[in-house]
């Protein structure tokens, strides 16, 4: 849960257990209030998503997924983050010593936090690209994927696909569709 999105509100869906009188089993359900926008049986959705991923990994250009050209200087980003943290510590000391007042502290802190958020986001965007590399180091990406535990698959899944669960088409019956 938390990986798939609702096809109506783009909010996260969660897993839930359905009572045996309603067919039982695990489902994905939109987290919005009430009944939510979408509900689907978990197993067929998981099977479908895995089939889509395996088809994508079988394509000749699949290895490009793991390669990401970047001109970002990761060390410079790291240094920028450390500099901002040091400035925050200095600002905190200045406030404690009475050199700046509370509005100044809040203003400086907001600026530093925004800078840290930007650095963290850029680092994350450039470091996560390497997590797909191991998929292409074994005999085949599909075999490697099949050997991974669910926790590892969940970690890289958002880099491969966006799972969006759509509502049933008008007039469709849930028992005939997943």
Image: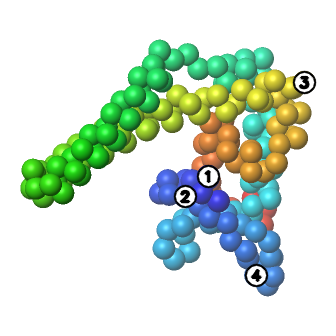
Name the N-terminal-most of marks 1 and 3.
1
Looking at the rendered structure, the secondary structure element under dot 4 is loop
Instruction: Tell me the tag on residue 139.
Output: 3
The residues bearing labels 2 and 4 have C-alpha atoms spaced at a distance of 22 Å
In depth, the one of 169 and 166 nearer the eye is 166
Q: Which residue is mark 2?
A: 12
Mark nearer the viewer, 1 or 3:
3
Looking at the rendered structure, the secondary structure element under dot 3 is loop
The residues bearing labels 1 and 3 have C-alpha atoms spaced at a distance of 28 Å
Mark nearer the viewer, 3 or 4:
3
Q: Residue at 43%, 38% (x, y): give it.
A: 120
| Pointers 2 and 4 in contact (C-beta within 8 Å) | no
| Pointers 1 and 2 in contact (C-beta within 8 Å) | yes
Q: Which residue is mark 4?
A: 19
In this rendering, the answer to whether 156 lies above or below 19 is: above
Q: 9 left or right of 27?
A: left
Q: 76 left or right of 151?
A: left
In this rendering, the answer to whether 148 lies above or below 129 is: below
Name the N-terminal-most of marks 2 and 3.
2
Name the N-terminal-most of marks 1 and 2.
1
Instruction: Tell me the tag on residue 3.
Output: 1
Q: Position of residue 86 (x, y in %)?
A: 31, 40
Name the N-terminal-most of marks 4 and 1.
1
The residues bearing labels 4 and 1 have C-alpha atoms spaced at a distance of 23 Å
Name the N-terminal-most of marks 3 and 4.
4
The residues bearing labels 1 and 2 have C-alpha atoms spaced at a distance of 7 Å
């Amino acid at each position: 849960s938390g990986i798939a999105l609702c096809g109506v509100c783009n909010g996260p869906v969660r897993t839930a257990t359905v009572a045996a009188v309603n067919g039982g089993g695990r489902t994905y359900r939109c987290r919005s209030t009430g009944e939510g926008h979408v509900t689907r049986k978990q197993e067929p959705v998981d099977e479908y998503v895995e089939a889509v991923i395996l088809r994508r990994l079988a394509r000749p250009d699949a290895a490009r997924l793991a390669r990401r050209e970047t001109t970002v200087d990761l060390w410079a980003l790291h240094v920028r983050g450390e500099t901002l943290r040091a400035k925050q510590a200095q600002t905190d000391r200045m406030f404690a010593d009475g050199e700046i007042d509370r509005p100044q502290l809040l203003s400086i802190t907001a600026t530093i936090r925004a800078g840290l958020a930007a650095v963290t986001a850029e680092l994350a965007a450039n470091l996560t690209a390497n997590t797909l590399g191991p998929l292409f180091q074994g005999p085949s990406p599909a075999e490697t994927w099949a050997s991974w535990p669910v926790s590892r698959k969940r970690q890289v899944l958002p880099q491969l696909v966006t799972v969006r669960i759509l509502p049933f088409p008008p007039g469709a019956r849930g028992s005939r569709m997943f």
